[in-house]
Image: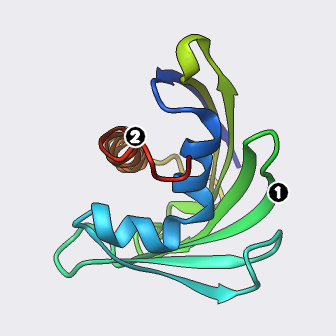
């Protein structure tokens, strides 16, 4: 199995605690409201702590039907989280799981510096094609962009 690792960083004008809250603490409420492709986000097991599993259900006609994420680690005070996408109808015979570590640090001017480390673990000796990986990354970044835009438009939210 050949593991693929990606590191991404970006800056935004939203404070770390607000971004963390919107993306990870309140995603089950916020995502269906601000992202037209998300039908619902439901807890499959757990209470939101490590080991909990959430399922993101997408609208009919989207490129995937669902994605299950397991929370591995969460540190609200330091705005850090690790989670693993453990199941999706889009994984097929290519992907076993995808682990992500995300950290938001304070940036000058009250914004954030976001650091994301993603590890893609293919099934067996499969080498996922670049189009599949690119689509996954773009979908992931759409979520971040939607939350950032919503928080900028609603400065009182999670303040």
- Give the farthest residue toward the left: 61
Query: What is the C-alpha distance between the residues marked 2 and 1?
Result: 22 Å
- Whichever of callouts 2 and 1 sits on the residue coming sooner in the sequence is 1
Q: Where is residue 130? Give x, y as percent.
A: 38, 38
Q: Which mark is residue 73?
A: 1
The circle drawn on residue 119 is none
Residue 117: tell me if it is visible.
no
What residue sits right under mark 2 in the picture? 148
Looking at the image, residue 77 sits to the left or right of residue 91; the answer is right
Mark 2: secondary structure: helix
Secondary element under disc 1, as helix, strand or loop, is strand
- Please provide percent x and percent y for residue 113: 59, 22
The structure residue drawn at horizontal position 33% and vertical position 48%, both measured from the top left corner, is 150
| Residue 52, percent from left and from top | 74, 77
Judged left or right of residue 79, residue 69 is left
Residue 86 placement: quadrant: bottom right
The residue under the point 74% across, 51% down is 82
Residue at 60% from the left image edge and 53% from the top image edge: 21
Tell which of 33 and 51 is nearer to you. 33
Q: Nearer the viewer, mark 2 or mark 1?
A: 2
- Residue 141 in the image, given as x and y percentages of width and height: 40, 41
User: What is the quadrant of residue 104 in the picture?
Assistant: top right
Q: Is residue 123 left or right of residue 156?
A: right
């Amino acid at each position: 199995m050949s593991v693929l690792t990606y590191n991404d960083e970006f800056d935004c004008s939203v404070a770390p605690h607000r971004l963390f809250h919107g993306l990870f603490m309140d995603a089950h409420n916020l995502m269906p409201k601000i992202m037209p492709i998300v039908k619902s986000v439901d807890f499959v097991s757990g209470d939101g702590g490590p080991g909990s599993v959430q399922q993101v259900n997408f609208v009919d006609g989207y490129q995937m039907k669902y994605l299950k994420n397991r929370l591995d680690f969460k540190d609200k005070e330091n705005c850090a989280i690790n989670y693993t996408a453990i199941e999706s109808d889009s994984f097929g015979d290519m992907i076993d799981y995808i682990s992500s570590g995300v950290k938001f640090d304070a940036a000058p001017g009250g914004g954030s510096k976001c650091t994301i480390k993603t590890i893609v673990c293919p099934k067996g000796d499969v080498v996922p094609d670049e189009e599949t990986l690119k689509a996954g990354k773009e979908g992931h970044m759409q979520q971040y962009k939607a939350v950032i835009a919503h928080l900028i438009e609603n400065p009182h939210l999670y303040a």
